[in-house]
């Protein structure tokens, strides 16, 4: 093959690296086939293509989309790029053995030391290139990547200098689209691999074990000292392997790491989400080579063993004392089905929606068939962010969460999910999953009342909200019931046993509480007080706009605990109003659906 031809390139692994390479190679004019075992992701990718944003801003559509390497057998590829985690490479290479041909060149586009060796048993050393990537990204959807940085150049080379021409062709293709890539000899390539691994190993396990972003880790004097010592251990081992760095290398490493963003490195994300990590090819390699040369690598050994211990088993569920008990209770309480083994939730893909309301935060986790497998509700009154983080950590420990979406009152100040959507969009998605077509959705929440109208295609056509006054909301009901001395959980059944027809004269909470006290002093029964309050709320909602002649559904925490309101509203609107199952979780369920769709 000469450098004037556009080669046929297959890429196995559609994580951030694989997606960015696919878009860039397609942009360069190559015939690109993409492959990943995640069927949901590949279906989305085939329908819409890949979108890359931030540092790079581009997109591409692909005709050749596969879920198995064997499906690429008829393409007669020139290059096959492995953009996988190192622990996935051996099995992926074995599956791709059917693609082996005289002209095929394989490329390891992975982090770590000696990762290219994993391809040798199938393809051989003389058919293998190594690509040192100096870019990264985060998945923000099944087919969407936010490129977080690119520090040019990338480096590519033949691992034994036998196919340098193939390395140069690929470098030229990438350079033509501004994706600066330099071809190196095998010895220079090895040095760059060690350099990159020293940088990755210095921060990744620390961020994972400490649950710190790169920016947080580099902002603390104590962690900076640890980082510098890990780097020095790596340099000492490298020198024993005849790999030498300039005198100012440590200073350059620290400068580079200080420019890291406020996000988690890849290994830390895997560790936090209870997935296998690449620690054996990062810090573990310094330990391995250190033993070979009798060099002590105490910090690298400590972090290697800590990361391994945390991924071997479900660590959060083994924590003794109050924290471990707290997490066990969260998972036990929230599971929809109690009889499934824990391994099932860690080996399959799941999607999480979080509805951060003014009074409660609701969590819903769904599987790939859109079945809810976990629901949990957390009072938001005390605003304790640590409790919210503990719940999230427990969920991520027990479930393999692929993507997540936050919505609701507090979504704008929440950065722990892949997506952020409005509660209107999530409510429409949640209800539309069960009821297709035109509809009204009434959502009475903690501090507002919303009516959303969807058209025949389930798109939001109109949206109405009550005024800023909290009258008629969950907060209003809570204060009124407390003033009247009525158990709020009993109000619905009490109101259903009353024929009272008088409503509160005032919707201002202050005046309403005074009026309620007057009712109490007059000896009015709890049944009549409850019905009078409900009549006031029903009349308040009835003044909002509703399209007649289409189905109307109610969701939200208020209707969950006050179902009699739907009967009263049906009378007011002269329409049948239905309550969705698990109404308080409909919005978080919709958020999970949007996370699944990306």
Image: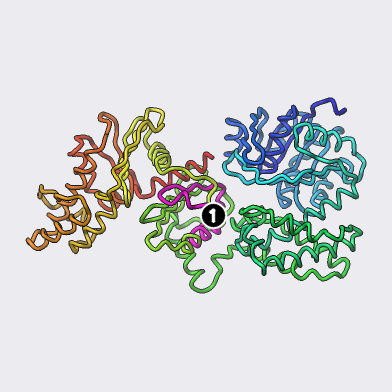
Question: Measured from the top left, where is residue 326 in percent x and y?
Answer: 47, 67
Q: Nearer the viewer, residue 337 or 183?
A: 183
Position of 328 relative to 588 (above/below): below
Residue with the most extreme top position: 4
Position of 571 relative to 8 (above/below): below
Q: Quadrant of the C terminus?
A: top right
**Would you call the spot at circle 1 few (<14 residues within 10 Å), some (14-19), or many (20 or more)?**
many
Q: Is residue 541 left or right of residue 459?
A: left
Q: Is residue 423 left or right of residue 121?
A: left
Question: Measured from the top left, where is residue 396 in percent x and y?
Answer: 54, 56
Residue 383 belongs to the span the image colors magenta: no
Position of 433 relative to 111 (above/below): above
Q: Which residue is mark 1?
A: 399
Question: Measured from the top left, where is residue 375 in percent x and y?
Answer: 43, 53
Residue with the most extreme bottom position: 321
Magenta segment: 390-416
């Amino acid at each position: 093959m000469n450098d004037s031809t556009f080669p046929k390139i297959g890429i196995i692994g559609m994580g951030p690296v694989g997606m960015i390479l696919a878009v860039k190679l397609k942009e360069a004019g190559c015939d690109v086939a993409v492959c990943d075992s995640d069927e949901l992701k590949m279906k989305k990718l085939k329908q819409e293509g890949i979108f890359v944003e931030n540092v790079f801003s581009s997109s591409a559509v692909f005709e050749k989309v596969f879920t198995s390497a064997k499906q690429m057998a008829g393409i007669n590829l020139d290059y096959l790029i492995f953009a996988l985690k190192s622990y996935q490479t051996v099995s992926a290479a074995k599956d791709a053995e059917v693609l082996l041909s005289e002209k095929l060149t394989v490329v390891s586009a992975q982090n770590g030391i000696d990762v290219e060796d994993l391809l040798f048993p199938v393809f051989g050393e003389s058919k293998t290139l190594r690509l040192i990537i100096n870019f990264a990204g985060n998945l923000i959807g099944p087919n969407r990547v936010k490129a977080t940085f690119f520090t040019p150049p990338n480096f590519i080379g033949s691992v034994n200098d036998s196919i340098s021409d193939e390395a140069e062709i690929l470098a030229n293709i990438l350079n033509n689209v501004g994706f600066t890539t330099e071809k190196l000899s095998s010895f220079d390539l090895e040095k760059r691999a060690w350099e990159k691994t020293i940088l990755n190993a210095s921060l990744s396990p620390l961020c994972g074990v400490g649950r710190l972003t790169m920016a947080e880790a580099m902002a603390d004097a104590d962690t900076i000292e640890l980082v510098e010592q890990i780097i020095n251990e790596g340099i000492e081992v490298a020198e024993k392997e005849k790999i030498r760095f300039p005198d100012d290398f440590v200073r350059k490493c620290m400068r580079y790491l200080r420019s890291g963003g406020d996000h988690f490195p890849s290994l830390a994300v895997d560790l936090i989400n209870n997935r296998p990590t690449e620690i054996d090819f990062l810090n573990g390699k310094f330990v391995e080579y250190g033993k070979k040369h009798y060099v002590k690598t105490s910090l690298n050994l400590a972090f290697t063993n800590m990361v391994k211990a945390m991924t071997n088993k479900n660590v959060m569920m083994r924590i003794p004392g109050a924290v471990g008990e707290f997490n066990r209770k969260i998972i036990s309480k929230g599971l929809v089905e109690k009889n499934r083994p824990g391994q099932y939730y860690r080996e399959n893909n799941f999607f999480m929606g979080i509805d951060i309301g003014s009074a409660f935060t609701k969590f819903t986790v769904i599987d790939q068939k859109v079945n809810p497998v976990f629901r949990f509700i957390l009072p938001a009154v005390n605003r304790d962010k640590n409790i919210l983080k503990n719940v999230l950590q427990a969920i991520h420990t027990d479930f393999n969460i692929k993507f997540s979406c936050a919505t609701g009152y507090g979504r704008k100040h929440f950065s722990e999910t892949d997506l952020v959507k409005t509660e209107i969009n999530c409510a429409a998605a949640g209800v539309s999953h069960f009821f297709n077509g035109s509809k009204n959705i009434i959502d009475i929440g903690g501090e507002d009342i919303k009516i959303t109208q969807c058209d025949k295609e389930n798109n939001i056509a109109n949206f109405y909200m009550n005024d800023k006054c909290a009258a008629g909301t969950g907060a209003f009901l809570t204060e009124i019931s407390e003033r009247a001395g009525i158990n709020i959980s009993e109000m619905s059944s009490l109101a259903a046993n009353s024929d009272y027809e008088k409503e509160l004269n005032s919707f201002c909470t202050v005046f309403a509480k005074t009026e309620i006290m007057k009712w109490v002093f007059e000896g009015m029964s709890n049944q009549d007080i409850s019905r009078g309050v409900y009549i006031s709320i029903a009349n308040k909602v009835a003044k909002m706009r509703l399209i007649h002649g289409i189905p109307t559904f109610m969701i939200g925490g208020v209707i969950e605990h006050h179902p009699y309101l739907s009967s009263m509203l049906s009378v007011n609107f002269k329409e049948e109003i239905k309550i969705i199952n698990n109404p308080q979780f409909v919005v978080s369920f919709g958020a999970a659906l949007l996370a699944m769709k990306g």
